[in-house]
Amino acid sequence: MARPRKPLLSTGRIVDAARALVDAEGLAAVSTRRLAAELGVSGPSLYNHFRTKDQILEAVADSVSAQVDLSMFEPAADGTRPGWRAALHDWAVSYRAALREHPNIVPVLAQGPGRRPAGLRLADAVFGAMVDAGWPPAQATSIGALMRYFVMGSALGSFAGGFVDDEDAYDPADYPHLGQAHLLAERQEQVDERAFETGLAALLDGLAVQYGQLTAGTTH
Amino acid sequence: MARPRKPLLSTGRIVDAARALVDAEGLAAVSTRRLAAELGVSGPSLYNHFRTKDQILEAVADSVSAQVDLSMFEPAADGTRPGWRAALHDWAVSYRAALREHPNIVPVLAQGPGRRPAGLRLADAVFGAMVDAGWPPAQATSIGALMRYFVMGSALGSFAGGFVDDEDAYDPADYPHLGQAHLLAERQEQVDERAFETGLAALLDGLAVQYGQLTAGTTH
DNA sequence: ACCTGAACACCGTTCAAGT
DNA sequence: ACCTGAACACCGTTCAAGT
């Protein structure tokens, strides 16, 4: 067949298949030929729907950004809003959870929103909410950036999983304090979860101090 | 020539050339053939010194980890030590500075220390210093992890540089708060620097609160 | 031990040809 | 408009052959 009466492919089908492949086998497993085979077509067919392979991966990244809950930045039905601290906390948790469901695409996401709509919506929501809460624009920008650093860093790779699960790798003569490091790998999830919550709480506590100084500065 | 009397290659020369290539043209530009050409040999020659291309990149990553200053975790000549907060601050600044000199290798570094000696030395130093400062081991682990999240996230990609430098990309109807976002790209360095310092200060302030509660708990 | 060229099984992308 | 196979210029890696 050369051209079917109904298109075999669509951008949506390609993105779904690419995301499944990335999740199952990693970024390196995604080749245009492999992805096309998964979709039952030949490799060059994809180029009718995307200009490059990179744009397919960008679309996968954006589909993951789109999963992040942003509702905490909107006023509730009764017109009230959660405080900026609570909103920021819940957003960071949702953000990290979305990335951890698709960890292999995080390096692509980490390149910034660029022109990806879901990434831009996310940046718009957090910046707008911080400004509305009384943060000066420059500080609101910093908050968007530093939260991103922390969430991306925590999702990019497991801290605990970065250590090999082999006691012999940690010679006490070379690394006197890593005697238990080989245990990290098996408690990966707990270790990373706890570090994330600890860091997030510290970050928000520290920002609250700065916010207090801000208000103090305004009053006199 | 088949085999020269003096080896043409060494692991050191290969790593230096690979790091230069990564810095100049990015990870994607590193192919075994290209790297070999840069070194004046044929592609397969590299396999006499490294088992895979990935191991070459790991070695480059470790050579960057080795640049991170760890001296703030050691006792000074007079036996005194900086406090854990000051040490952590200076370490984070040095860590980020080292990564920002070689941003293209950060995704490799972000996979964790694995068996890379400089990466393990770094993890050993910060964990040991936190325990010596009185943090319980589990919390010292969290601190190592959360500092890594933040530094890696801040080095992995510029926040500001992630936005395109094109006013038309930010339709006010879609992104009501991103009217100035196109200006971020040109102030990239300042914006990221400021966000990093703001976040680092917040993180350390927040940890200081937790440290205070720790001591309070011990006394009664 | 350390280099070479040839070879294998892949890549991303372009393009003319088909309907 | 949307698919195909053929082709181009690449990949990482293996291996027998050379000294």
Image: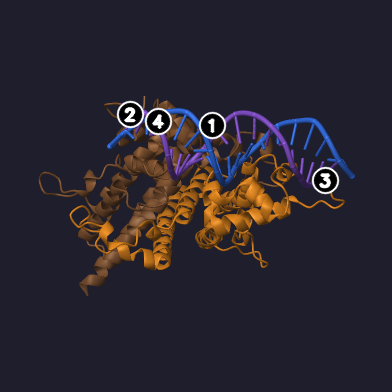
Chain colours: A brown, B orange, C purple, D blue
Give the mark toward the camera: 2 or 1: 2
Cα–Cα gap, marks 2 and 4: 26 Å
Q: Which amino acid is tagged 2? A: Arg
| Residue receiving disc 1 | A186
What label does residue A20 carry, if any? 4
First along the sequence among labels 2 and 4: 2
Pointer 3: residues within 10 angstroms few (<14), some, or many (20+)?
A: few
Give the image location of residue B76, x and y in percent.
64, 65
Q: Which mark is residue A3?
A: 2
Q: Is residue B121 visible?
A: no
User: Badge 2, how many Cα within 10 Å: few under 14, some, many 20+?
Assistant: few
Q: Which mark is residue B46?
A: none
The quarter of the displayed image where residue A155 is located: top left
What is the secondary structure assignment of the residue under circle 2? loop
Labels 1 and 4 within one chain: yes
B102 left or right, relative to B37: left
Q: Is residue A216 left or right of residue A38?
A: left
Q: Inspect the image, locate mark 3, and give the three-letter code of the amino acid beneath it.
A: Ala
Residue at mark 3: B2
Query: Same subunit under labels 1 and 3?
Result: no
Point out the frontmost of discs 3 and 2: 2
User: How much space separates mark 2 and mark 1, taking CA atoms?
Assistant: 51 Å
Residue at 29% from the left image edge and 53% from the top image edge:
A123
**Mark 3 vs mark 2, CA separation in Å:** 53 Å
Query: Which quadrant would residue B200 be assigned to in this image?
Result: bottom left
Is A156 rendered above or below residue B78? above
At numbered mark 3, what does the secondary structure look like: helix, strand or loop?
A: loop
